[in-house]
Image (spheres, rainbow, N blue to C red):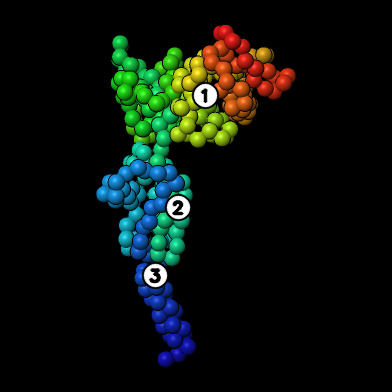
Amino acid sequence: MNKRMLSLLIGLVVIAVLLVVNGCVFVVKSIEIKYETPTNLSEEEQQEFDRNIIEKSGLSIGKNMFIIRESVVTKNIEKNVKDVEVVSIERYINKIVLYVAVRTPIMAVPIATGIDETKYVIVDSMMKVLSVVDGTPEELEGLAIVENTPLTGGSVVVGETLSTAYGNVVYQLQNVAVSFQYAGLAPKEFSKFITRIRVTATEMTLVTNEGVSLLVDLKDKNNVVLTTEEIKHRVKRAYEWYLDVGMTVSGGYATYDAAQDAYTWNSSI
C-alpha cells in the first residue's frame, strides 16, 4: 500500500470516528427547565407544563447539539406557549437548560371589534398578547386599564407581540411598562400601583391606587416629541416622588418640573 492510499485510509478513519463521536456525544440527552418566577402549579400540573414547553420548543432527545439554534427555540416557545418568556438558554455537552419566566399580565387595552362592541387585550410589560376578553369586572380585576385609546388595525393574535401597527398608543404603553421596570417596579407590582392609564397626543395620565394622577409629558414645551430615554427618566422621577411623598396623599395630580427635575403635587385636577 503506497503512502497516498495510506493517507486516504487514515483520513477516512478519522472522519468516521468524528462522525461516531459527534453522533454519540454531542447529542441532546436531557432537557431541563428552570423558572425565574414561581408558577404556583401542582406537581402534576408542573410536569405537564414542562412537557408542553419542551414539545413546543422543537428540542428532542437525540437531536444533534450543533444544529440547535437558540433563536429558533426561543421563537418556538414564545409563539406557542403564550404565558412563557425565555430568559436564556444554556447548553452543555449533551444537556440543554431552558431558563424561563411566567409572563405577568399588567394592562387591559381596549380594541374595537365591531360597531358597538369593545373587547380588551391583556398584555404583559413587553406588549405580548396573553388573552382577549370581554371586559367583565372579574376579567379586568387587578389590571391597569387603558381608558380612552382603543387599538386600531384589526384583530390581534394571542401569543404575538403588539406592534405600533395597532396605533402609537402601543409604543407609549410599552414605554410606561419598561420605564417602571427601569425604576425598580416589578411587573407583578405594576397593576397594584397603577389602576388606570389615559394617553393623548401630548401626555399620559397614570392613576395610582390612591387616586393620584401622575402626568407624564410626551412632548416638551416647544411641542417636540420626547425620546424614549426622556420619557423613561420622567417616569422614574414620578415613581421616586410616589415612594417619597405620593403614598401619603390621595387624589390630585403630580406634574414634572423640569427646572427641579422632580415631580410636585397639586391637590386638585
Say what amino acid the circle numbered 2 marks. Ile
Identity of the residue drawn at 44% across and 19% down:
146
Dot placed on the residue nearer the N-terminal end, 1 or 3:
3
> Going by the image, does 245 lie left or right of 6?
right
Q: How many marks?
A: 3
Whole-Å distance between the Cαs marked 1 and 3? 49 Å
Identity of the residue drawn at 45% across and 90% down:
2
- The residue that disc 3 covers is 25
Query: Is residue 262 or residue 258 the one in the foreground?
Result: 262
Whole-Å distance between the Cαs marked 2 and 1? 30 Å
Residue 174 pos. (x, y %): 50, 28
Quadrant of the rendered image containing residue 218: top right
In contact (CB < 8 Å): disc 1 and disc 3: no
Residue 106 pos. (x, y %): 43, 29
Dot placed on the residue nearer the N-terminal end, 2 or 3:
3
Identity of the residue drawn at 54% across and 30% down:
180
Say what amino acid the circle numbered 1 marks. Gln
Q: Please tell me whether mark 1 or mark 3 is closer to you in this view.
A: 1
Q: Which mark is residue 89?
A: 2
In contact (CB < 8 Å): disc 2 and disc 1: no
Q: Please tell me whether mark 2 or mark 3 is closer to you in this view.
A: 2
Say what amino acid the circle numbered 3 marks. Val
- The residue that disc 1 covers is 172
Quarter holding the N terminus?
bottom left
Residue 139 visible? The answer is: yes
Residue 8 pos. (x, y %): 44, 81
Residue 269 pos. (x, y %): 56, 8
